Image (cartoon, rainbow, N blue to C red):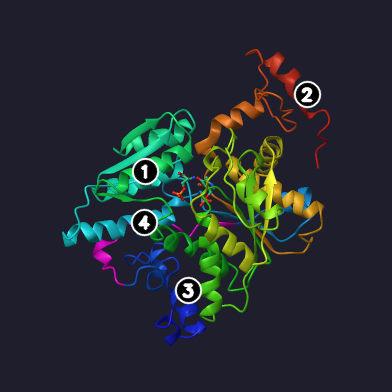
Amino acid sequence: MDALKNFDGAYWRDLFDSRVGKTTWPYGSGVWSKKEWVLPEIHPDDIVSAFEGNSNLFWAERFGKHLVGMNDLWVKHCGISHTGSFKDLGMTVLVSQVNRLRKLNRYPLVAVGCASTGDTSAALSAYCASADIPSIVFLPANKISMAQLVQPIANGAFVLSIDTDFDGCMKLIREVTSELPIYLANSLNSLRLEGQKTAAIEILQQFDWEVPDWVIIPGGNLGNIYALYKGFKMCQELGLVDRIPRLVCAQAANANPLYLHFKSGWGTDFKPVNATTTLASAIQIGDPVSIDRAVYALQKSNGIVEEATEEELMDAMAKADSTGMFICPHTGVALAALIKLRKSGVIGPSDRTVVVSTAHGLKFSQSKIDYHSKAIPEMASRFANPPVEVKADFGSVMDVLRNYLRDKPPK
Ligand SMILES: Cc1ncc(COP(=O)(O)O)c(C=O)c1O
Ligand SMILES: N[C@@H](CCOP(=O)(O)O)C(=O)O
């Protein structure tokens, strides 16, 4: 930081803005266009990048106006990315460093490994495959989506399907990487957070360096909420902006250890929980490795933790999709938290608010299929939009359409 402070805020703003939209290697990446803040020493030839980042900061006009009475609601689509989740931002940094270490031949690195609820393993396997580095992933059996599972398989990772949950996989990978020369790729490794923090810098850049009032992020292992905080804080400390947004971490009620800790007033000792099944499957985590980082970030940003039930998160996802988005259930958790915070008045109608969307909805399509076919037990699926089956003749089709159009007068 002292070295970075040799240059003022205007210098950094201009430097980062000058790289937007460029393909000069490696500055076409939303991560490596901030190389000096991420991993300054690495040579560009060692960088493993898919030009990740630079994701769409989408004005959620219709969801904002019609569902939460806001005109300044935005969704940062970090899931519109190479492997379909925000994990690419951190994985490019970690795999680049491993690539560099292997070339130095100083460390007996035989592979890179992670425990995963799906998206970390997808990102790790893709970036390792790109650099011809062996990858090993520990997955909780039958607890991730098919789309998530096929990614490491297709990318050539060594995939272990383990009869436990994510927390069990995380315990095992920590034990294994302390015994074997396998490099740990989970966000316990801070290299991941150095990449993920650039989403915060992008958000400020996309607002022309104006600071939003709120940023809402779904939380599981809790590395990302800290990474976003670090990105905002670096921008403040280096003079690019004069304040940071208030952060909200949104959790599934079925996997809500941070929420319970927050509601206890950040009581003396954090207690992990036994995370139970949630349709926001990627955050079914009861013993998050970055709990201390997340508490620090929330305390330093006057932050809040909210939770969402299964019905609340799925309804929020369905409503968001009905406004033209196609979000994952985890973004549904964040939007459900927003709805609650608007109802309680904590977030005001004119507050500029960003919801971080962490994965593409296509990775979790089965949950959407189940919702819209009303196949989720004990869930009303109020906004289900099932297809209408109709005989293949003109008369039957016209009858269905006349019925559908009857209460839709032309505008
Ligand atoms: C799609 C998705 N959203 C949100 C999260 C939560 O991120 P973190 O684990 O950094 O809290 C994860 C991973 O945990 C994820 O895969
Ligand atoms: N949801 C994550 C869980 C692991 O998170 P990490 O940031 O510690 O790798 C996943 O996609 O595996």
Residue 390 placement, left or right of 274: right
> Which label sits in the foreground, 3 or 4?
4
Q: Is residue 37 visible?
A: yes
Residue 106 within the magenta-colored segment of the rendering? no
Mark number displayed over residue 289: none
Answer with the quarter of the image where residue 211 lies: bottom right
Residue type, mark 1 in image: Ile
Q: Main secondary structure of the magenta part?
A: loop
Q: Residue at x 32, y 39 (%)?
A: 155
Q: Which residue is mark 1?
A: 173
> Which label sits in the foreground, 1 or 4?
1
Q: What x and y, as percent, mark residue 135?
A: 29, 43
Work out whether 270 lies above or below 150: below
Residue 44 within the magenta-colored segment of the rendering? yes
Return the disc, 3 or 4, that comes first in the chain's sequence. Answer: 3
Residue type, mark 2 in image: Arg
Answer with the quarter of the image where residue 311 lies: top right
Residue type, mark 4 in image: Thr
Answer with the quarter of the image where residue 275 lies: top right
> Which label sits in the foreground, 2 or 1?
1
Q: Are marks 3 and 1 in contact (CB under 8 Å)?
A: no
Q: Which residue is mark 2?
A: 402
Q: Are marks 3 and 4 in contact (CB under 8 Å)?
A: no
State the CA–CA distance, disc 2 to disc 3.
53 Å
Residue 390 placement, left or right of 205: right
Q: Which residue is mark 4?
A: 92
Work out whether 119 lies above or below 261: above
State the CA–CA distance, disc 3 to disc 4.
21 Å
State the CA–CA distance, disc 3 to disc 1.
39 Å
